[in-house]
Image: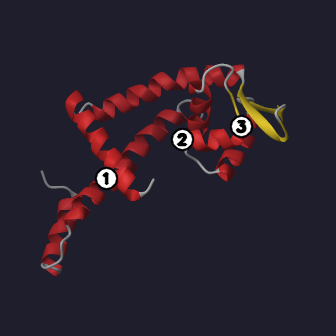
Amino acid sequence: MTDQVDRILEQWHAEKPGLDISSMAVIGRLSRTALAVESRLEATFARHGLDASSFDVLATLLRSGGPYLMTPVELSREAMITTSAVAQRLNKLEGRGLVAREANPHDGRGTLVSLTNAGKELIDRALPDHLETERTIVTALSIKEQKVLAQLLARINDAAGS
């Protein structure tokens, strides 16, 4: 089965026959797959009035366990987003009543972020749909292939410096 990446590789082979372009096959497909997956996930999030970043913040608070409370720095680290992105996301989520901020009793200058009841209810509704979307995407692979791919992607991620 020939895809767009195959056509790009053929063009490079024709134009630069001595150039080793083998990495393009992996990186090109990885990039195209990431875009396709993000698009599918965004559609699922949108059905719940969320976007990927909002889902990630709410899901991070939920998976932290009760009382669903974290500092913005912890949230940034655990959600793998920048502190400035956390601040923007928290403003939006707080405005919707999905999270609340309060003074940190252990740090007079800091705040704590908590998942509100409305935020917990929303993430509890969105999470099963999100997981179903992910399952639908990966069903093209056997369980064993999924495990191997996850391991290989972790190695690429490590090599890329993330």
| Mark 3 burial class by Cα count in 10 Å: few <14, some 14-19, many 20+ | some
**x, y (%) of residue 52?**
54, 41
Helix, strand or loop for disc 2: helix
Residue 37 or residue 102, whichever sits in front? 102
Instruction: Give residue 135's quadrant in the image.
Output: top left
User: The residue under label 2 is which amino acid type?
Assistant: Ala
Query: Does the rendering let one see residue 85?
Result: yes
User: The residue under label 1 is which amino acid type?
Assistant: Leu
**x, y (%) of residue 36?**
36, 47
**x, y (%) of residue 76?**
62, 44
User: The residue under label 3 is which amino acid type?
Assistant: Thr
The residue indicated by pointer 2 is: 52
Q: Which mark is residue 44?
A: none
**How are the residues colored?**
secondary structure
Residue at left 23%, top 28%?
143
Distance Cα–Cα, label 1 vs label 2: 19 Å
Tell whether 123 sits left or right of 26. Answer: right
Tell whether 72 sits left or right of 21. Answer: right
The residue indicated by pointer 1 is: 30
Q: Earlier in the sequence, mark 1 or mark 3?
A: 1
